[in-house]
Image (spheres, rainbow, N blue to C red):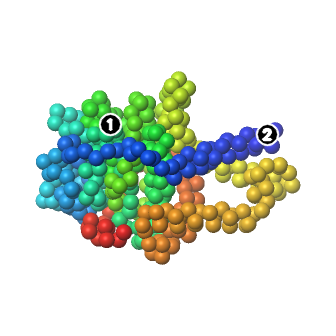
Amino acid sequence: MIQMIYYILFTITLLYGVYFVITGLFAFKHDDIPKIRPFRARTKFAILIAARNEALVIGDLIKSLKEQNYPAELFDIYSLINNCSDNTLEVAKKAGSKIINVTVPCKSKGDVLKFTFNKLKKKNYDAYIIFDADNIVHPDFLKLMNNTYLSGYKVAQGRKDTKNISDNWLSSSYALFHYVQNFFFNKSRMNLNAACAINGTGFMVAKSIMDEGFDPKTVTEDIELSIQCVLKGIDIAYVEEAITYDEQPTKFNDSWHQRSRWSKGIIECNRLYRKQLLKKWLKDKDFSCIDKFMFSIAPYVQTLSVILTLMLGVFYIFDIELNDIFSYFFSLGLTCFMIGYLIDVIINMFMMIYYKRDLYDNLHGIFFFLVFMATWIPINVICLFKKDLTWVQIEHNRKSSLDALLNEK
């Protein structure tokens, strides 16, 4: 009976991994006909910046937005001030941003955005673009989102990059995590004509969609919005050249809190929407629905893989033989680990080269990325059993300029 349980669980995790390997390979598919075409500038954007004690960095973001290759009369910048105890409001106003004071209790960025969407409901905009206050934005971002909107996409995610990639192994690992997500998830889904994923910052959503109502229930409003769009049959595009440079944590404690929020949010989204996703997939054969369902069970599958490894350890101690690939690799021990580690390093190097990052400056991330991912295991296990999660602010203090980031490439 125990062996049978193991075989069933192993088959589930194996198929899960194979699914993402196969879908990820579509990132290499070349599209002869571009899905996004160039248009003259005519989309009017409201740029929204959620800001809580971000006085040190918000000015740099607004400056980069002021330097966009896009007509100034076609976009407005709003800083959404909530629960600030510093001079974020004054810095944002001086930099040239309009101000929206969020006057309701906010437990997450989703609450801030919900308040703002209601506030701007009667304003004449075509679409919203959302950034975090620590971002720096590529000068062609708005021009590319204009092209995307006029090509028929009402929701789109830009590429996430990192403005402090080489600080230490943690920031470099974060960059690699986003590169893998950009390439093997969003780029591949774009090639598969499936819905891509909204990744928290640097994304566009049509105002008409938000005017219908946005009431996030989880601490990850980006994942929740992605799922809601899929359930409504709304395509989500990925715009690779629309780049947002994000500040990544350099302290492990900050990283732990941030990734705990992400994991808890994914778990909450799965509990809220799994039945709807599966129902729509079975009814309409919509690949994007099963794809988002598969994404939302990641914390469960990772925890399951830990259980499988522990079971193999018990089988090994009691000399119980299992005839499958997993146990064979397990018996190889160090050899199997080194092969897997080498593959990981090669993929990491490919990601750095593809996104034109210096290999030498990021060796710590390339070689320790597997450690970064391994530390996600206890986070997922804890989040599966933790009922509530308190939002913890991550300090942002990395001053940077658009010119400096562009010259790094």
For label 1, count other residues whose C-alpha is less than 10 Å away and answer few (under 14), some (14-19) or many (20+). Answer: few
The percent coordinates of residue 407 (x first, y second) are 31, 71
Q: Residue at x 76, y 42 (%)?
A: 7
Q: Relative to the observer, which residue lies in front, 132 or 39?
A: 39
Give the residue type at disc 2.
Answer: Met
Is residue 6 depicted above or below 65 in this figure? above
Q: Residue at x 71, y 53 (%)?
A: 309
Give the residue type at disc 1.
Answer: Gly
Q: CA distance from mark 2 to mark 1?
A: 50 Å
Q: Relative to the observer, which residue lies in front, 127 or 308?
A: 127
Q: Which residue is mark 1?
A: 152
For label 2, count other residues whose C-alpha is less than 10 Å away and answer few (under 14), some (14-19) or many (20+). Answer: few
Q: Can you say which quadrant of the picture contains the C terminus?
A: bottom left
Is residue 278 depicted above or below 40 in this figure? above
Residue 369: image quadrant is bottom right
Label for residue 34? none
> Which of pointers 2 and 1 lies earlier in the amino acid sequence?
2
Can residue 218 be seen here?
no
Q: Residue at x 19, y 52 (%)?
A: 70
Is residue 126 depicted above or below 245 in this figure? above
Q: Which residue is mark 2?
A: 4
SS state under label 1: loop
SS state under label 2: helix
